[in-house]
Image (cartoon, rainbow, N blue to C red):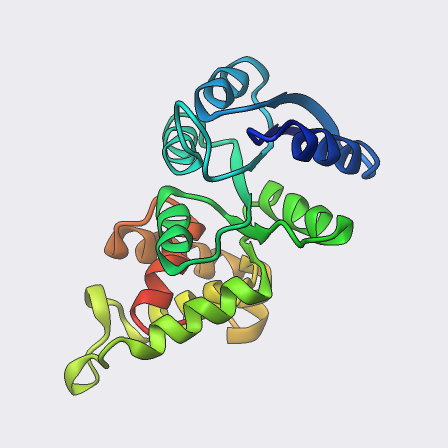
């Protein structure tokens, strides 16, 4: 797995390089200090995953994530930041990040998030997940039991499973359907919610009380 690390603090960046290089089958192909450098590094190295800070000079992690997910669909982003406010979390997931960790994360947390992202799966820090759930509970319930975005009941079930971090295979087992059927539902969920990827769909789910 090829990984790029993006953080404007040299000591943090060097520490993350050390951690990642000790993980099995992980190669750190670049370590850079801002979003512009991240875009150039992604274009040069085509990594599987970018470990991205949020607050940086020149171009922040939100905008860099947005460009990466639009221009390099084979590269996934995991945010690693000290910021866990609702605005930062929603902005990162809406921009396309698949993972969101705080800088209190340990080596095993980073390992799990990188590998989940490489498989196209979402993984959120428990604190982040709890904040999204709390935010969803503050949203007014949809009137008359109507589902948002014209989702069918089955599509809503699939979206809820996605918000729990389940893979397509795990969703198929949970709902007793084929994996091909799940893929069809996932694509419909993306289309109806205007999501480019699972991270955006998960953010949508939590905003509408489906997570």
Report the front residue among 184 and 139: 139
As displayed, is residue 150 above or below residue 45? below
- Residue positioned 64% across, 49% down in the render: 113
As displayed, is residue 37 above or below residue 48? above
As displayed, is residue 193 above or below residue 68? below
Please give left or right for residue 106 compared with residue 116 in the image.
right
Please give left or right for residue 45 compared with residue 88 in the image.
right
Q: Can residue 86 be seen in the rendering of this structure?
A: yes
Residue 68's image quarter? top left
> Going by the picture, which residue comes out furthest to the bottom?
144
Locate residue 49, reporting x and y percent. Answer: 59, 34
Q: How many marks?
A: 0
Report the front residue among 62 and 141: 62
Report the front residue among 203 and 8: 8
- Residue positioned 51% across, 74% down in the render: 175
Q: Can residue 210 be seen in the rendering of this structure?
A: no
Locate residue 114, reporting x and y percent. Answer: 65, 43
- Residue positioned 56% across, 21% down in the render: 46
Residue 206's image quarter? bottom left
- Residue positioned 51% across, 31% down in the render: 74
Report the front residue among 195 and 51: 51
Locate residue 83, reporting x and y percent. Answer: 49, 51
Residue 209's image quarter? bottom left
- Identify the image quadrant of the C terminus: bottom left
> Going by the picture, which residue comes out furthest to the left?
143
């Amino acid at each position: 797995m090829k990984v790029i690390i993006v953080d404007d603090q040299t000591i943090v960046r060097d520490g993350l390089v050390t951690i990642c290089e000790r993980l099995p089958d992980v190669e750190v192909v670049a370590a850079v200090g801002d979003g512009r450098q991240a875009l150039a590094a992604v274009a040069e190295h085509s990594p599987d995953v970018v470990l991205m800070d949020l607050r940086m000079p020149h171009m922040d992690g939100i905008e860099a994530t947005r460009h990466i997910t639009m221009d390099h669909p084979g590269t996934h982003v995991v945010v690693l930041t000290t910021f866990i406010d609702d605005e930062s979390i929603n902005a990162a997931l809406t921009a396309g990040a698949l993972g969101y960790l705080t800088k209190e994360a340990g080596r095993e947390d980073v390992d799990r998030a990188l590998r989940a992202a490489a498989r196209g799966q979402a993984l959120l820090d428990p604190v982040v997940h709890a904040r999204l759930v709390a935010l969803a509970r503050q949203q007014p319930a949809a009137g008359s039991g109507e589902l948002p975005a014209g989702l069918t009941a089955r599509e809503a079930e699939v979206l809820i499973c996605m918000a729990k971090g389940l893979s397509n295979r795990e969703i198929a087992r949970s709902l007793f359907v084929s994996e091909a059927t799940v893929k069809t539902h996932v694509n419909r969920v993306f289309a109806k919610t205007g999501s480019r990827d699972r991270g955006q769909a998960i953010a949508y789910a939590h905003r509408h009380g489906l997570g």
